[in-house]
Amino acid sequence: MRKEILVVDDEKEIRDILELTFKDAGFNVRSVASGEEAVEIFKNEDYLVVFLDIKLTGLSGFDICKEMKRIKPNSFIIAMTGYTDLFNQDKCIGAGFDYYFPKPFKFNHLMQLARDALERIEWWRKI
C-alpha cells in the first residue's frame, strides 16, 4: 500500500509538525502552504489522502476540496480547523470532505485516520 499524504496549511508550524509526525510513522508526506499549489500537486501526483486546513489565504479549503473531489473522486480529504461550529461542519459536508478534524490535534487520532483512509482507498482499488 502506498502511504502518500498531502498536508495543506498556511501555518508553517502546523505543516512542520504534521510532516514530521507522519514521516516518523512511515508515511511519505508533502506539505504546502497554498491551495493553488496543493491543487496542482494533487492533479499531477499520486496523493489521495489530504489533510486540508479550511481557513487559507486565497482559495478556501472548501473550494479546494470541491476541486480535488472533482479531479479524484475516490480521494479521502480531511478538514482541519480551529473553528468547530455547526456552520463549518455543514459546509465541510457540502464541500465533500470525508472527515472533520478540530485543532488542536491528538496525533494518535490523526495517525489512525490516515491509516484508515489509506486502507479504504486500497480496498476500493482492489474491487
Image: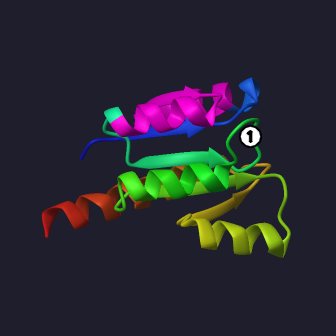
The residue furthest left is 127
At a point 24% along the width and 66% down the height, the residue shown is 124
Q: Position of residue 113 (x, y in %)?
A: 51, 58
Residue 71 as seen in the image, left or right of residue 89: left
Is residue 42 positioned above or below 67 on the image? above
Q: Position of residue 57 (x, y in %)?
A: 76, 35
User: How many labels were placed on the picture?
Assistant: 1
Q: Which residue is mark 1?
A: 56
Residue 64 as seen in the image, left or right of residue 86: left
Q: Which residues are magenta?
A: 15-43
Secondary structure type for disc 1: loop
Q: Position of residue 13 (x, y in %)?
A: 75, 26
Is residue 59 positioned above or below 62 on the image? above
Is residue 9 positioned above or below 74 on the image? above
Is residue 111 positioned above or below 14 on the image? below
At a point 59% along the width and 65% down the height, the residue shown is 95
Tell me the kind of residue under disc 1.
Leu
Name the quadrant containing residue 123: bottom left
Q: Residues within 10 Å of mark 1 (few under 14, many from 20)?
A: some
Q: Is residue 83 magenta?
A: no
Residue 125 as seen in the image, left or right of residue 96: left
Res 27 seen here: no
At a point 27% along the width and 42% down the height, the residue shown is 2
